Image: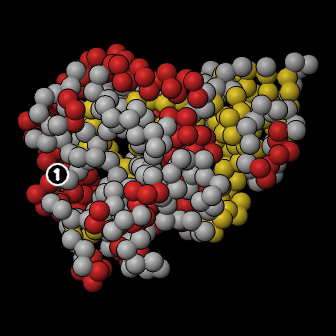
Amino acid sequence: MKRLLKGGRVVDPVNRRDGMFDLLIDGERIARVGKDLEADGQTVVVPVPTGLVITPGLIDMHVHLREPGQEHKETVATGTAAAVAGGFTAVACMPNTSPVNDNAGVTEYILKKAADAGLARVYPIGAVSRGQNGEQLADIAELRQAGCVAVTDDGRPVATALLMRRALEYTQMFGMPVIEHCEEPTLKADGVAHEGFHASTLGLRGIPGEAESIMALRDVSLAELTGGVVHIAHMSARQTLDAVRYGKHRGVRVTCEVTPHHFVLTDEYLGSPVPYDTNTKMNPPLREAADRDAMLQGIADGSVDVIATDHAPHHYDEKQVEFDRAPFGITGLETAVSLCFDRLVHGGVISLSRLIELLAVNPARILRLTGGSLSEGAPADISILAPDLRVTVSVAAMRSRSKNTPFGGWSLRGGVVATIVGGRGVYLNKEFQDLRMSGYEDFRI
């Protein structure tokens, strides 16, 4: 089937488009993008309401889908349902499942589950070390052949400098980045919150920003030594941003990501509005205002390459314990776009085009995925966004199996209208049912 999306603002940084264009979808691919395109007798015209924006499909390169082994928290099906509701046409999933994704069997299992779900594209990320134990390098060639797009020991850092060196050297042969959870274990120790005034007031053990930045400096140095590609995951500390800037200045192949919770929240939320709310416990922790402001500055000046959610679902019961005992992490797929619009675009930090670079273009570039643009012949992976849509975050309505978010009840400006993957409508916001009635009957609401 051919469909012509007509009348929307197209924002496509790769092709330097930002204006009113029509977009023709032929089957699974984009056929044409241009002004005043004509529809033949076999083409269904889909009028795009005024004020909506058509962008390349958003890609979240840091998601925990939990399956296999932790299906009580999330499954590939529920996680990808959350993804498309959040505007993401693709996600890259972390390997800290049970068993760990350190072999082709687990990778192939995840890909089969994704195919069965038929929602967002899923790109598995393999483990750096066998069992993520930090001792023996996983078979990276096998992981790559099975479909992994990167390697990481996320949830913990790559244990030794030698292991990181070998990983950076080996992944070069396959054009893969090593994604690093930057954490110096002896400095982090048994900390549960950012080391500072608020943790001290609440009697919580602290994690200094240097626990992150020291490891980042190690890995930037090793990337320079080897010529490998290192991607710093969920950056939170201003010292880490300095390390990334240092590496980029020296020509090191280093990129980085920031999560919405690290550019929106600070450690003040540990005590307010609900003291010891375990939905404010994540790793790395919420930092102080100076760190939050540094992340915003890095996003604005181009030092930050990607916004990723670090979607980390946990069962309700697991979070309803003492703060020290609760697991780290929050969900993020269904709140990210609204937080980005509200705090970054409407907050005057960045343009909409820059936001699409952070959410689509750069993730595709770093992971070498076929996505991130609306080029003719590219897969028809498309996000339709509403910059001025008023959104109230409803925890009950979330499609994720877990609901551990600190943003429940927040009122935000900007949201998702529809998500199209391979030319198929996989999500439609209920407020825009007219799109479903005008040529896209397969939209899921």
Three-letter amino acid code at the position of disc 1: Met
The answer to which quarter of the image holds residue 23 is top right
Residue at image location 15% in from the left, 37% down from the top: 134
Image label count: 1
Which colour style is shown? secondary structure
Query: Which residue is depicted at the point 47% across and 23% down?
Result: 111
Judged from this view, the residue extending furthest toward the bottom is 201
80 vs 170, nearest the viewer: 80
Residue 209, position in %: x, y? 22, 64
Residue density around tag 1, few if under 14, some if 14–19, many if 20 or more, within 10 Å: many
* Residue lying at 15% horizontally and 60% vertically, measured from the top left: 189
Q: Nearer the viewer, residue 17 or 357?
A: 357
Image: 152 above or below 25: below
User: Residue at position x 26%, y 17% from top?
Assistant: 141
Q: In this view, does 196 lie above or below 303?
A: below
Q: Pinpoint residue 17: horizontal percent, then vertical percent.
A: 63, 41
**Extreme residue in the left direction:** 162
Camera sees residue 91: yes
Evaluate whether residue 228 shows in this view: no
- Residue 137 in the image: x percent, y percent? 16, 27
- In the figure, residue 436 lies in which quadrant? top right
Relative image position of residue 55 (x, y in whole percent)? 63, 41
Image quadrant in which the C terminus is located: top right
Query: For mark 1, what is the residue?
Result: 215
